[in-house]
Amino acid sequence: MEVDLELYRQEIRLASQPPARLSVIDVAPDLSQRTLVFLHGYGGQAIQWGYQLRHFSNTDRTIAIDLRGHGRSDKPAGRYDMPQILSDLQSVLDALGVADKAVLVGHSFGGAVAVEYACAYPERVSHLVLIASTGEYRLNPFYRLLLNLPYPVIRLLAPFTRNWLGAPPHVLKAWYQDSISRWNGWSLFRSLSLPTLVIRGHHDRVFERPLFEEVTRAIPHAEEVDVGASGHMVMLERRQAVNRSISRFLEQSQLSWRETASTNDDLQHNALLRRRPWLPHYDETVPFTIAVPRVPLHYLLRSAVRRFPNHAALVFEGARLHYSRLNQEINCFAHAVLRLGLNKGDRILLWLPNLPQMVIAFFGTLKAGGAAVFTLPNTQPEELARQFRDCGARILVTLDQFYDQVQQVLMHLGPEEAHLEHIIYTDAGDYLPTVKWLAWRLKRQKAGLPPSAVDGRTHDLRRLIREQSSEAPQVSVTPHDLAVIIYTGGTTDLPKGVMLSHYNLVANALQTRHWIPDAQEGGERFLCVLPFSHSYGLTTTLNVPIALGAALILKATFEVGDILKTIRRYKPTIFPGVPQMYVTIKDFPNVRRYGIRSIKACISGSAPLPVEVQEAFEKLTRGRLVEGYGLTEASPVTHGNPLNGLRKVGSIGIPLPSTEARVVDLRRGKREVQTGQIGELAVRGPQVMMGYWGLPEETRRVLSSDGWLLTGDVAQMDADGYFRIVARKADMWYPSKPGEPAFPRDVEEVLFEIPQVKEAAVVAIAGQPVAFIIARKERPTAEALIAYCRRRLPPELVPRLVLFVDDFPRTFIGKVLRRELARRFNQNPAQANIEKPEAV
């Protein structure tokens, strides 16, 4: 799987004279088995090890260094001799905290550096791998002639060598004079006692063939691999053969090739399997753990801009915004809010649907060092005012269509609450194509804000950013800074602000990205209907596609006819959604004529996915629809069914890479229950929140000191490590049998088996199950539904009433509000839009 290694690049400052910085790529997954340090050769650079870094970083920590003067490292004046190079290497390993013995892998003169370091610090090296290395480096006469030219002349050659050499000519001259021309390693080879592998290309003509052949004979007990059909850059030309050779050497396996091919190294760790029994069921190319780059979230965007500047980033109602232009707009927004007085850590509340402006404001806030506060577009003014008081946001970004609601919010806040200093309005049509923009203006019959709204506190987004710099602002943002506050749904109590760091969101974006192993970098199109202001939408429809360099097809609302026309026109390949969306599409008349077979992967979350819905939707699209699971407090995705492997219907699947999960006692939330038993789901991983904003006691109630988060969901795990969500703890009830709880999904799955039932929600009212039904055109009778349930369920789970309704009260993303159903029923069935119940 392609991973942008530049996300893992960092700078190490050296205390040398003159001071210098070395650029290092450090990919460090949790539970790594060993550390491999890759050293490039003369004129090389760290990124040349890209194939090896990606291959070995699934299980090992991999470090590649731009040596002094090479790649992105500093190129100071002074000597480039071996003592200085060894000192640099020692400083880098110390700065990175490499305490255990490391495997040194050196190419060409990098092999000489590895040998010198192993002899000087044998306690820090476990194995040596020398690739295309010799005991002395004799350049051909032409290159020696060039390197003997004066420095002023040498510098003139730099523009001509920039694309094929990792160091400028004047640095190469210094390296050659101070190190390479003087190095003779034959005596060092003979003194080596640690395991050594020598790899050479069969057609390597950079140096004399006898020099390569003599290396293995000079090193006691060294192993040799002669890779056919390759030259000096063997690790690039025959990367798979080189990777296999290194793997076999490090494992020292005596298995046959058949056994080796079917054995996963991690499965030999029985202790790990006991803690994570789901690992054998990962898709073949999905790693058990991932290395989370220690970068702020907007570096994912920077990566996409660097790799795919001219690819479409946003597709909005026919308009396209490419990655390079999107990045410029984001930079302009960042500079604008900085000019408004935003300080690092200040909050900006974003009250917007899925528009280009939402993406611009979100990433612009992060680049300016602020934290984005999300609230759903349908949030009521009273609740929005409460959230303003809670988070202390200084800036609001919203639609001018919400002007009247904003005035209501300000009335609720009152003049004494002056922390809301600026309101930035935007028009929903600002990024429409010209023809649609004109039609939008005519439809609205007015343009912009009321004249009375223009003052020093109120701003128009387009005017505000028009004259700002499009260069990235120079604001220092660390991975563990607060990135977003997302207010939870509040189905049981007042919404709480969940604090997620840049590290949390980067981790979850990459965990989810790895869960889609067939996704192509720069080649996917995401249908973005889930609101970015919800944690599920933020990760799966914004951060993941940005990490992939994908095109985001933005939809501000879910209207099934419009969505199907969008699918037919833009042919999205990945469609994260909620069950209600898939149900609506599945039931739409003549749905096949909209060409929905372009969709190859869907991840359903937020609510249980009925089996019948999954099977029907997959038949329509020929793609894969799998159920996943998450919660805002975990950024949010923690579980998913494998897209290509074993899927268990009715389950949320298995934990994502670098995620642990267990089921604990329902009452105390600490003791882990036995496999198959019901309890509360607890999760741990790099995506788990920082805590609740301003609620330390609530944080301590759900988040333990060692990182375990209590989810509030009742679940069970089977012997394969697959989890099934039974219900929310708040939704379960205790029937006649004391101590044995009952759960809505046990009843709902049976009701979904009945063809006339479109949707079902079961709620316990006065301790008895009541079924709320949305029926199809041919509505069944309550008696028929009850009779069916009696045949399929134990007596205590059979619904006591069946109530037919037109629709369910839902959250913005379609989750059924069961407590609202119960409240409406208890207040007045007629006012709750519930038909007269049929007694049974």
Image (tube, grey):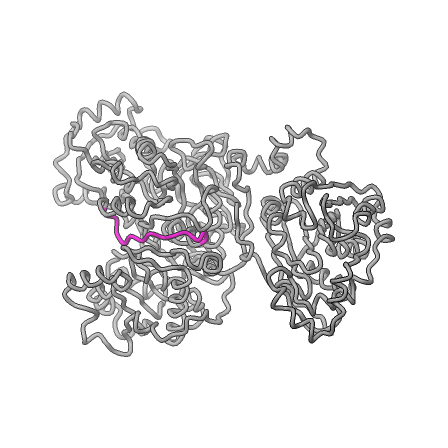
Q: Position of residue 709 (x, y in %)?
A: 46, 48
Residue range (magenta): 547-559
* Front in this rendered view, residue 212 or 220: 212
Furthest residue toward top: 791
Determine whether 704 is above or below 172 in the image: above
Q: Is residue 743 visible?
A: no
Q: Is residue 190 visible?
A: yes
Q: Is residue 649 left or right of residue 295?
A: left
Residue at 53% across / 50% down in the picture? 3
Determine whether 468 is above or below 49 in the image: below
Determine whether 648 is above or below 67 in the image: above
Q: Is residue 702 left or right of residue 558?
A: right
Q: Position of residue 832 (x, y in %)?
A: 16, 44
Residue at 45% across / 68% down in the picture? 369
* Front in this rendered view, residue 351 or 668: 351
Furthest residue toward bottom: 456
Residue at 67% across / 40% down in the picture? 247
Determine whether 529 is above or below 156 in the image: above
* Front in this rendered view, residue 813 or 125: 125
Q: Is residue 725 left or right of residue 41?
A: left
Give the quarter of the figure containing the C terminus. Answer: top left
The answer to whether residue 556 is magenta is yes
Q: Position of residue 111 (x, y in %)?
A: 75, 53
